[in-house]
Image (cartoon, grey):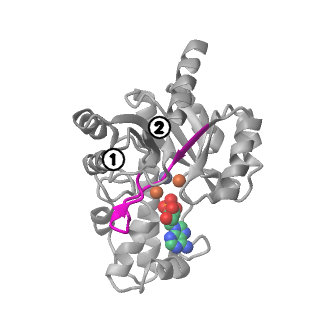
C-alpha cells in the first residue's frame, strides 16, 4: 500500500487536530508519510516530527502560503523548507503581525457599526493561529449579531462589507521566492480552486516546481487536466487531502485519496536536485 498525504492542517493554523492527534490518525490509517502544511506558519512541525518518530511515520516539513493574484486567492505549498531559517521566520512573523493589525482595524469598524466585540474575544477564538475573518465571524455569531458565518460575511466582513479591511498582500511569485530561498520546493496548491489557470504558465516562469494534481476538491477530469499540464511544464506531481479535521463517516479526510508513495519519491528527487544546483 504505502499511501501518503501531502496536504494536512493542524491547530497551528485552522485545523481541528493537534499535530500529535494528526500523526496518530495517520498511524491508525497506516499511512507511510504526511506533510504538515499549515497556512503561513511552521508552528506545528516540531511536534509532528516528534510524534512521527514515535509512530514510525515520515513527516515532511511544509507550509501553505496564502497569496493574492489579481484579487483572487492563490495558495503556494512549500515542501522541505528550512523551518528554522531565521529570515523565513521573520517573514512569517511579519505576516502574522499584519493580520493582527488588520483584525484590530476590522473590529474598530464593527464597533463603529454599534456591535460590541473585543480583540480579546477574537484572540480567544483564534488561539495560537494567525487571525482571520472566520475568527471574527465566530465571535459575532456568539454574540447573536448574526445567525451564522455566512450572514456575517454578507452583512459585515465580505469584500464589499462595511467592516472589511484588505489583507496584507504577498504575490505568488514572492511566496515561490521565499520557499526556494529556504531550500523548499514550491508547488501550486489545488489549481482546481483557482479561477484562471493561465497562472500556472506564469508561475512556471517564476520557478514553480510542482502542481498539486490530487486534491479532495478535484474530480477525475480535473486530475487528468492537471496531470497533463504538470507533464507539459515538467512539474512534479503532488497530492493531498487538505484535511482540516472535519469528520466524515467517523473519520477525518486524512489519507482518503490513496496517493501513492511514488509521488513522495519524486518530491525527494527534486529536493536533491535543488541541492545540487545550489
Ligand atoms: P482572511 O484570510 O482573513 O481574509 O479570511 C479568508 C477566509 O474567510 C477564507 O479562507 C474562508 O475560509 C473565509 N471566507 C471567505 N469568504 C467567505 C464567505 N463569504 N462565507 C464564509 N466564509 C468565507
Ligand atoms: Fe485552511
Ligand atoms: Fe489551500
Ligand atoms: Zn490547505
Q: Which mark is residue 40?
A: none
Q: Who comes first in sequence, dot 2 or dot 1?
A: 1
Residue 245 within the segment the image draws in magenta:
yes
Q: Which residues are magenta?
A: 237-254
Is 128 drawn above or below residue 180 in the view shown?
A: below
- Report the front residue among 9 and 212: 212
x and y, in percent, of residue 183 in the image: 51, 25
Question: Which residue matches tag 1?
Answer: 26
Question: Which residue matches tag 2?
Answer: 91
Q: CA distance from mark 2 to mark 1?
A: 30 Å
- Report the front residue among 139 and 187: 187
Is 265 drawn above or below residue 44 in the view shown?
A: above
x and y, in percent, of residue 128 in the image: 30, 53
x and y, in percent, of residue 252 in the image: 37, 60
Q: Left of 168 or right of it: where is 80?
A: left
Is 207 drawn above or below residue 72 in the view shown?
A: above
Amino acid at each position: 500500500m504505502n499511501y501518503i498525504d501531502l496536504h494536512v492542517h493542524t491547530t497551528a493554523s485552522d485545523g481541528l487536530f493537534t499535530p500529535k492527534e494528526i500523526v496518530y490518525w495517520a498511524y491508525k490509517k497506516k499511512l507511510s508519510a504526511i506533510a504538515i502544511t499549515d497556512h503561513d506558519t511552521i508552528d506545528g512541525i516540531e511536534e509532528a516530527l516528534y510524534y512521527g518518530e514515535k509512530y514510525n511515520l515520515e513527516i515532511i516539513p511544509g507550509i501553505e502560503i496564502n497569496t493574492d493574484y489579481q484579487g483572487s486567492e492563490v495558495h503556494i505549498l512549500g515542501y522541505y523548507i528550512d523551518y528554522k531559517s531565521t529570515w523565513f521566520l521573520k517573514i512569517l512573523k511579519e505576516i502574522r503581525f499584519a493580520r493582527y493589525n488588520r483584525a484590530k482595524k476590522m473590529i474598530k469598524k464593527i464597533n463603529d457599526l454599534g456591535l460590541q466585540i473585543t480583540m480579546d474575544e477574537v484572540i480567544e477564538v483564534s488561539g495560537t493561529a494567525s487571525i482571520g475573518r472566520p475568527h471574527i465571524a465566530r465571535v459575532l455569531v456568539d454574540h447573536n449579531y448574526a445567525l451564522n458565518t455566512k450572514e456575517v460575511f454578507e452583512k459585515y466582513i465580505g469584500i464589499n462589507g462595511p467592516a472589511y479591511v484588505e489583507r496584507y498582500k504577498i504575490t505568488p511569485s514572492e511566496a515561490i521566492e521565499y520557499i526556494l530561498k529556504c531550500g523548499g520546493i514550491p508547488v501550486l496548491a489545488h489549481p482546481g480552486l483557482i479561477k484562471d489557470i493561465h497562472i500556472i504558465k506564469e508561475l512556471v516562469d517564476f520557478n514553480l516546481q510542482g502542481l498539486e494534481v490530487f486534491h479532495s476538491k478535484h474530480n477525475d477530469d480535473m486530475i487528468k487536466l492537471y496531470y497533463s499540464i504538470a507533464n507539459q511544464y515538467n512539474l512534479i506531481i503532488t497530492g493531498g487531502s487538505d484535511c482540516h479535521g472535519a469528520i466524515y463517516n467517523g473519520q477525518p479526510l486524512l489519507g482518503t485519496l490513496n496517493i501513492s508513495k511514488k509521488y513522495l519519491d519524486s518530491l525527494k528527487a527534486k529536493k536533491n536536485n535543488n541541492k545540487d544546483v545550489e
